[in-house]
Image: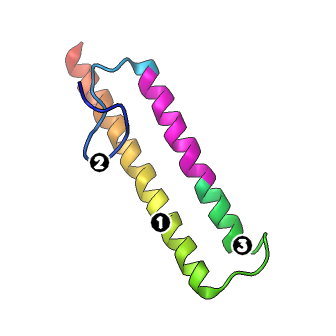
Amino acid sequence: MGSKNFDENNPPDPHIPPEEILELFTNELRSSISSLKGFAELLAGRHGEISPSDQAKFAEIILKQADFISRTLRDVQEYLVARKTLE
């Protein structure tokens, strides 16, 4: 059986029950969205001023989180397609 994480090297195993995939998916998205929100708030100046170098770092983190969310959504789509082949 494959990994129970969402990562680019191990898409979810289609034999994993959908309830577990949904739980993993929501946990991954919740974590990523919290990170995006926090760094966006910092960039928006809601917690004081930040240096230009920190702004660049935070923007990179936001981009990486957005890429992660895109990969996670792709993995869920691949999982759903694979589940259909099992039916």
**As rendered, which of 30 and 2 lies closer to the eye?**
2
The answer to whether 27 appears left or right of 77 in the picture is right
The circle on residue 63 is: 1
Amino acid type of the residue tagged 1 in the rendering? Leu
Q: Is residue 64 above or below residue 34?
A: below
Q: Which residues are magenta?
A: 20-34
Q: Position of residue 20 (x, y in %)?
A: 44, 22
Q: Secondary structure at mark 2?
A: loop
Query: Which residue sits furthest top?
Result: 87
Q: Magenta stretch: dominant SS?
A: helix
Q: Mark 2 = which residue?
A: 8
Q: Quadrant of the N terminus?
A: top left
The circle on residue 44 is: 3
The answer to whether 18 appears left or right of 33 in the picture is left
Q: Is residue 72 above or below residue 67?
A: above
Q: Position of residue 74 (x, y in %)?
A: 34, 44
